[in-house]
Amino acid sequence: MGWVKGEVRELTRWTERLFSLRVDADVEPFKAGQYNRLRLFIGDEWVARPYSYVNPPDVRPLEFHLVAVPEGPLTSRLMHMEPGDEVELMPRSTGLFTLDQLPDARDLWLLATGTGLGPFLSILGTDEPWRRFENIRLVHSVRHGAELSYRDRIRAFAQRAPERFHYQPLVTREALEDIPQSRISVALQDGQLEALCGLGIDARHSQVMICGNPGMVRDTQAVLKTRGMQRNRRGHPGQITVENYW
């Protein structure tokens, strides 16, 4: 399958290494939660990596939330792109981290670390989660408070349904007055997370989507499994849907 050319429209820097890239490209329709691949010709070869969409499917330009990886050849180039620069994408998106893979439930929990927030913003920008779930909780854990990106967009979700939606930020390496310092798995295990969110997590009422670094995904799943919750697999419905994002 060939690649399509994309034109950079805007780059937003959140921190020295954390940024968002908006790109115009003629890609096929996709589902919220799916990802594409970005590639550049670097040195003497093409370098490509997968990145989830931040934008909902009906919104353009395409948007990606990225962190520059030390010694990473692609992100170190992408973070310095300017409007008008070109980057290539696949014409067709992929991925099963989408709401149509989830059984129905009363509550939807979205647990993210770092740039794993991206696919959840795409999902929340559609009507489906608001139509299907009575309660929605978005939890975003980062190392430092400056990495809590997209606060304005998240605030708009809260204004859309303040009685149904709650956003809970966490930081792990900085003591802040208004944001708890804890990892998602620890806050879940000791009960702090549910107390902060005003809602319990259990196998009967909850669907939990987890997107972030593999350690968080592993540890959070382990806590949930002690509550009788299982991975959601094709043909074997469960309560946990995961995507490693590293």
Image (spheres, helix red, strand yellow):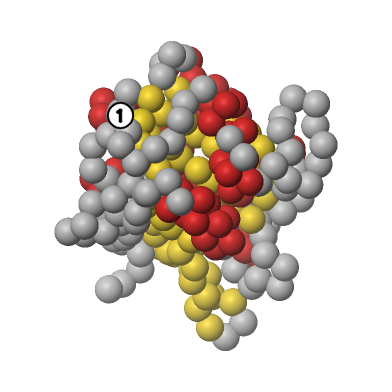
Q: Nearer the viewer, residue 232 or 190?
A: 190
Image location (x, y in percent) of residue 73: 64, 72
Q: Is the N terminus in the top left, top right, bottom left or bottom right quadrant?
A: bottom left
* Quarter assignment of residue 27: bottom left
Farthest residue to the left: give it: 235
Q: Considering only vertical position in the picture, is 207 above or below 92?
A: above
- Callout 1, which amino acid? Arg
- The answer to whether residue 32 is left or right of residue 140 is left
Classify 191 as above or below 92.
above
> Which residue shows up at 82% across the image and 36% down it?
175
Please determine whether, in this image, residue 181 is positioned above or below residue 6: above
Disc 1 designates what residue? 106
Left or right: residue 38 compared with residue 80: left
Disc 1: CA contacts within 10 A as few (<14), some (14-19) or many (>=20): few
Q: Name, please, the residue furthest toward the bottom.
A: 44
Q: Residue at x 30, y 37 (%)?
A: 204
> Where, quadrant-wise, is the C terminus in this rendering?
bottom right
- Give me the residue at 27% from left, 45% from top: 102
Q: Is residue 90 left or right of residue 42?
A: left
Residue at 45% in and 23% down: 165
Question: What is the total number of numbered labels drawn onto the structure image?
Answer: 1
Spot occupied by residue 233 in the image (x, y as percentages of width and height): 26, 59
x and y, in percent, of residue 56 in the image = 37, 38
SS at mark 1?
Answer: loop
* Residue 55 showing in the rendered view: no
The location of residue 113, given as percent across then percent down, is 58, 48
Tell me if I can see residue 88 in this picture: yes
